[in-house]
Image (cartoon, rainbow, N blue to C red):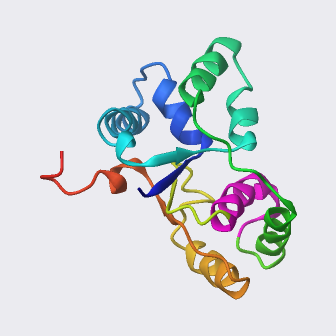
Amino acid sequence: MKTVYIETSIVSYLTARPTRNLLAAAWQNATNDWWETRRRRFELFTSQLVLDEAGGGDPEAAQRRLGALSGIPLLPMPEPVTDLVVVLLAKGALPRKAADDALHIAVCAYHRVDYLLTWNCRHIDNAEMKPIMRRIRALRGYACPEICVPLELMGKTNDR
C-alpha cells in the first residue's frame, strides 16, 4: 500500500468552515472529496509538527483539526531529518523562514513516504523549488516523495 503524509494545510482545509472565497471553497471541496473517497487506499502518516501546527489558533478549529488527525500514526524525527532540513535551507531549496516546511519535506524523504499531500504551494509544492529539493535529497541519498495536492491524487477517472 502506498504511503501519504498529511501536511497541516490538508487538515486545515478539511475541517474549515465553509467560505465564500471561490479558490478556498474549491480546495475545501477537493480535500473533502479526496478524504471521503481516496484516503483508505493509502497508509496515512503525519508528524508531531503537524499536530503542533494543527493545535494552534482558535480552540474550536484546533479541536476539529486534531480530531481529523486522530489515529494517524506519527513519523519520528531522528537527527538525520534535522540534518536534511539544515541542508535544504542552506542550499536555498526553501527560504530560511520556511524551516517548518523543510521539516515536512525532510521527514517524508527520510521515511521514504510515497506522497506528501499539501495545499502549501508557496514553499512545499512549488514547481520552481521542487527540482532543487530533488537534487539535494538525491545527493544525500534520500528518496523524493511525490509532492502533490489532493486533485493530483484522485486516481484514474474510472477508479472509484
Let me know if residue 97 is in the magenta part.
yes
Position above or below: 9 against 114: above
Q: Report x, y in % for residue 75.
A: 69, 49
Residue located at (35% from left, 46% from top): 41
Q: Assign the magenta stretch its main secondary structure.
A: helix
Q: Image quadrant for the C terminus?
A: top left
62 or 20, nearer to the observer? 62
Let me know if residue 31 is in the magenta part.
no
Residue located at (52% from left, 40% from top): 10
Number of numbered callouts drawn = 0
Q: Report x, y in % for residue 115.
A: 49, 59
Residue located at (49% from left, 33% from top): 13
Say left or right for 91 vs 33: right
Q: Image quadrant for the N terminus?
A: bottom left
Of all residues, the one furthest to the bottom in this rendering is: 139
Say left or right for 142 vs 24: right
Of all residues, the one furthest to the top in this rendering is: 60
Residue located at (68% from left, 40% from top): 50
Picture quadrant of residue 126: bottom right
Position above or below: 104 against 144: above
Of all residues, the one furthest to the left in this rendering is: 158
Picture quadrant of residue 132: bottom right
70 or 89, nearer to the observer? 70
| Highlighted range, magenta | 94-110
Say left or right for 65 vs 95: left
Say left or right for 1 vs 50: left
Q: Report x, y in % for residue 2.
A: 43, 58
